[in-house]
Structures are given as structure tokens and as C-alpha cells.
Image (cartoon, rainbow, N blue to C red):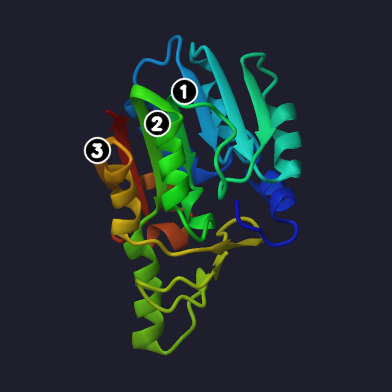
Amino acid sequence: MSKRTTGYESQWNETYGLDKDPVRKYLIYPLIDDQSGELSDKRILDAGSGNGNLLSYLASRSYKSAIGIDKSPEFINSARTNVPDERAQFVEADLLQKLPFEDASFDVVYSIFVLNELPEIRLHIQEMSRVLHSGGHLLIVATHPLFAMYYHLYERFTGKQNDKLIGIKGYFDREPVQYIFTLAKSSARFFQHTFEEFLNPLFESGMEPLKLLELRTDDINFQSIPSYWDTRDVPKYLFLKAQKR
């Protein structure tokens, strides 16, 4: 994964832990429950596992085995502590390189809020497809391409700098910008990706798209967080589900 700003891992663990991120709690994990289907006897890959929050959440499910990969040694160490499940293991790996697994090694691959940390995603999407067996599912959650445009247009038409994506220059901008976390006192490098960058690698690597959802923070649980609630009509997150042919 791309280099994060100093202290990101510590700030994330301190602020969000395993279950205090409202976006995951109210939007993403209920959707994962609904879209994952039956996980019994499935081999799972969490590509960009962070502190292990997804596999901690899935610990009650009857999957066969799971591997979480992340480039950050600090996150890998946190994940090993946070997920004391003998079915799960965590391995350091660079998502900008070929994944260290054989073809058709997994039944389900998750990519949750990872692709916008990578400057180039074509190879990684192709690699996630490669390690899936025929009939396996890939579930992706990423920042919606139009979410960045909202902040770009805010700056363009108000003349004021936004407080979320510092330095965003447009839909086709490929330079890294600074993503400010709402609750944690930290930031990370963010890369804008277009719809074609998300979808074309799926088509090219033998994946059949099954579902595309545009997620908003219009749930009443976000009323207490103005930065989410006040922009609830803006598509913030993109969900993609695809099946390996």
C-alpha cells in the first residue's frame, strides 16, 4: 500500500479501534453481511487488512480460513493481537506488487477502503482476480469518484479550501492529495480514481460485475456527525461486487 502520514496507524487504533468507525458500523459491515452470502468452508483474503477490523467482525462467521495482508508492520502486529482466531493469519505484503499467493487460492476477496490509497489500481484488481477461483467473489468498497469532485467544486465555486481532501484538482487528477479523517486527528495520502479505472480491470481480468451501489450517509446514526450528515446527499462510497468467471 502507499505510504501513509506519520502516526496514522497509532491514531487509527486509538480513535477507531475495532468497532468505533461509524462508516463501517452503520454502512459497510451491514452491507458486507448482506452481500457476502454463505461463508462456510470459504477461504477469505482481506487485501489491505489494517488493524484486522474486518476479520474481527467476521470472526463469528463459519469460514474455513482467512489471510489479511497489509504493508504496515504496525498494522500487522495490531491485527494479530486483535484477531486471536486460529483460522486467521496476517502477512506483510505490498499491494502494488504481485500478491504472494497461487492462482485460485481464495473463494472471497475483500478490499475495504484500500484502493484510494494506491496510486495505480489496475494491477492490484487483476491480482485480486487472479487469486480467486472460478465462481469466487470480489467485494470492493472505495471512495466514490464523485465524492472528490464535490470538494473540488466546493473550492472552485466558493474560493475556499475544503477541509476533507486538501489539494484535489479535479476528476482526472492523479496527484496524491491529503485526506483528513473526520474523527481521528490524522490524515493519509489519497488518490482519486475514475469509474473506468475501477471497472475496466474487472472486465479485463475475467470478472463479471454483479452489483454496483452508491452509498450515502443518510442513516439517522450520522446526525451527530455534521460532516457526514450535512453532505448526506453526496455519494460518498462505492460498492462493487464481482464474480470470477
Q: Residue at x 75, y 28 (%)?
A: 81
Where disc 1 sits, the SS reads strand
Residue 166 seen: yes
Tell me the crowding category of disc 1: few under 14, some 14 to 19, or many 20 or more residues within 10 angstroms, Cα based.
Answer: many
Q: Is residue 225 left or right of residue 181?
A: left
Q: Name which quarter of the figure residue 208 lies in.
A: top left
Where disc 3 sits, the SS reads strand
Q: Position of residue 8 (x, y in %)?
A: 69, 55
Q: Earlier along the polypeptide chain: callout 3 or callout 1?
A: 1
Viewer-proximal residue among 47 and 157 = 47
* Residue that numbered label 2 is attached to: 32
Q: Residue at x 34, y 79 (%)?
A: 153
Q: Are marks 3 and 1 in contact (CB under 8 Å)?
A: no
As measured in the structure, the alpha-carbon distance from the residue carrying label 2 to the one carrying label 3 is: 13 Å
In the rendered structure, find residue 106 and report the number of the disc placed on it.
Answer: 1
- When the figure is inspected, residue 40 is found, relative to residue 240, above or below; the finding is above
Q: Residue at x 51, y 78 (%)?
A: 167
As measured in the structure, the alpha-carbon distance from the residue carrying label 2 to the one carrying label 1 is: 17 Å
Tell me the crowding category of disc 2: few under 14, some 14 to 19, or many 20 or more residues within 10 angstroms, Cα based.
Answer: some
Q: Position of residue 16 (x, y in %)?
A: 63, 44
**Mark 3 belongs to which amino acid?**
Lys
**Mark 1 belongs to which amino acid?**
Phe
* Residue that numbered label 3 is attached to: 211
Q: Is residue 20 left or right of residue 135?
A: right
Q: Position of residue 238 (x, y in %)?
A: 34, 49
